[in-house]
Amino acid sequence: MTPTKTATGAGTSRRVVTTRSARASAHIGRHAQTIAIAAVLVVLLIFFAFSADRFATTGNIFNLLRQIAPTLVVATAMTFVISTSGIDLSVGSTVALSGSLLAIVLQHGWNPTLALVAILALGALIGFVNGWFSSYQNIPPFIVTLAMLSIMRGTALRATEGYSTPIDGDLWIVQIGQGRIAGVPVPAILAVIIALVGWLVLTRTPFGRYVIGLGSNGESLRRAGVNTRKVGLTVYVLTGLAAAVAGVLIATRLSSGSSNAGSGFELEVITAVVLGGTSLFGGRASMLGTILGALTLGVIANGLVLLHVSPFYVQIVQGGILLLAIFANSKVWAKFGAIRK
Amino acid sequence: MTDQEAGRADRVVMRDIRKRYGMVDALRGVTLRVGPGEVVGLVGDNAAGKSTLMKVLAGAVVPDSGEIVFDGRPVAFASPKDARELGIEMVYQDLALCDDIDVAGNLFLGREPRRAGGMMLDVRRMHADARRHLDALNIRIPLTDIPVGGLSGGQRQAVAIARAVTFGPKLLILDEPTAALAVAEVETVLELIKTVSAQDVSVILITHRLQDLFRVCDRLCVMYEGTLRADLDARSTSLERLVSEIVAHDEEDKEGRRR
Ligand SMILES: Nc1ncnc2c1ncn2[C@@H]1O[C@H](COP(=O)(O)OP(=O)(O)O)[C@@H](O)[C@H]1O
Ligand SMILES: [Mg+2]
């Protein structure tokens, strides 16, 4: 009795139901990791709020936000790169180079505004080189940016002779790292603005659409008439530029440019992005996830320090999280999604 | 006289097109012409070079040599964008969809409706227009905001076809567009071909369903190992003749090798 009933004229509606459930499962698949990381973040916040006395104070939260600002800025750009199924390992070295050069040119009496513009242009140029080799010459970005990692770190060491260079605290530029607006640290404000703009660009502009398309199926995108090489190059310019911004944030916060800054920074940034649910294989991205991922890493580092855990453990924990996140990304969450790679 | 010549002018002429992939001679000097509103069936064994020839025409593959004349003007396509701008649309054999992008996004890929001075996607208009275009083609995909990776093979093929016919092409290339379609859907596609060709759109159809070719085609072109071996009038050619043109070359070749 029941079978006959469903068989009569229910064809279309059943089809609609199947597609609706496909949409639901695709949505869950896409957002499962973002939801999961949000849950983890809440648990961590509660845990540290109860176990570390000074954790839940305004001062500490602002401090935490200022600390993760460089990570968040670069992670925003890195979300674009990883969405195209690329990677940029050179961001840590670019942080060191831009911070060092900023301090050096300021010491030579450059106008701070000019110095800032020059450093940002340098970051974009480094990204351009990365992008040209990866996107126009089809060399794996992993190798290209690994080589650039070495070149930029070496250049920073050569430029500073290994010493750190102080930045005069009277220059307006130190306000970028140390200033506050209505009590909120400037780096935190900058980072939030950049992340929001990143979210808007990724989800609401043709460029963002093409970034996803490039990671999803680059040849299809090319056949749709999109200049895929230009898109592929632009994302590296974004990470280069973001890394220079991060270098400026760190150097001005510490009032000194050091060639040792930003070591292991690329790992932290990539961890934040992957933790947020962006697929290393490209095509799937979550800017909200990236923001939550960066916050989570910051909370862990900050909380562990407040609990007087040796800072050496922070690095071990971060590496462990990266491994776990990639595992979850490729094994667990993929099962929810309608798409199988 | 001149009027007649203008009336008969070719929509597109490909002359002596050659393309080599390493050791594989995919195209060994192919010449093909299609008139306005004409439907040409392109057949041949697997690996005969049909898809490669059509990719050349769509700008997705740059040939080693040869020339293309479109609407009387010599053209050279550096990218699919160039061909698209002239009104050449292609449904690729592999569909060329982005699995992670939704139905509407794939439909408009590369020419998204924009707002705010071209800076932002007009997502709402995109979904509304996609709905309209799909309905106009009788394509039953209830939701335009699910990624195409989650659709069935037939639905994916329908999206690819919709993308090619929606933006008013002058030349429509269909590379095995019906492979994943059900019987009723194949009928829809054949009707579609008749409709657009009546509106002066030229169509090149690649398919292994030979019986379909006789229903919609004006001419049948047979390819064999990177060459065009036969150019037949569809009305005066029998199925047997077509089949023998497709397979006969095999025997010729075998004899050639034996010698
Ligand atoms: N991108 C490519 N790289 C190498 N060989 C290719 C490529 N595209 C096509 N070929 C080769 O060219 C020949 C013709 O292929 P194709 O045009 O796809 O044939 P058809 O569509 O008629 O089956 C085949 O031998 C195929 O292997
Ligand atoms: Mg083919």
Image (tube, coloured by chain):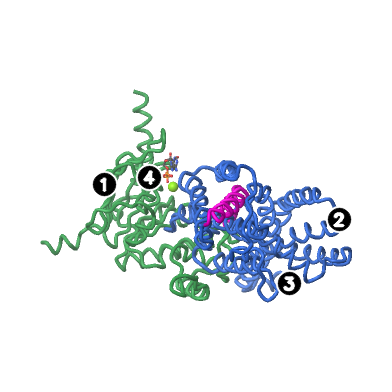
Chain colours: A blue, B green
Spot occupied by residue B121 in the image (x, y as percentages of width and height): 50, 70
**Marks 1/2: CA–CA distance:** 77 Å
Q: Is residue A5 left or right of residue B123?
A: right
Residue A308 is marked as 2
Residue shown at 52% from the left, 72% from the top: B123
Three-letter amino acid code at the position of disc 3? Thr
Q: Earlier in the sequence, mark 2 or mark 3?
A: 3
Q: Position of residue A207 (x, y in %)?
A: 50, 63
Residue found at x 67% / y 51%: A265
Q: Is residue A86 magenta?
A: yes
Asked if labels 1 and 4 touch by Cβ distance under 8 angstroms, the answer is no
Span shown in magenta = A80-109
Q: Which residue is mark 3?
A: A2
Q: Position of residue A147 (x, y in %)?
A: 56, 41
Cα gap from disc 4 to disc 3, whole angstroms: 49 Å
Residue type at the position of mark 1: Arg
Which one is closest to the eye, mark 1 or mark 2? Answer: 2
Image quadrant in which you'd find residue A252: bottom right
Q: In the drawing, what numbered circle is on residue B15?
A: 1
For marks 4 and 1 on the same chain, the one whose residue lies earlier in the sequence: 1
Give the amino acid type for the residue marked by disc 2 in the picture: His
- The answer to whether residue B95 shows anywhere in this view is no
Q: Nearer the viewer, mark 4 or mark 1?
A: 1
Is mark 2 in CB contact (under 8 Å) with mark 4?
no
Q: Marks 1 and 3, how far apart in space?
A: 63 Å
Tag shown at residue B243 = 4
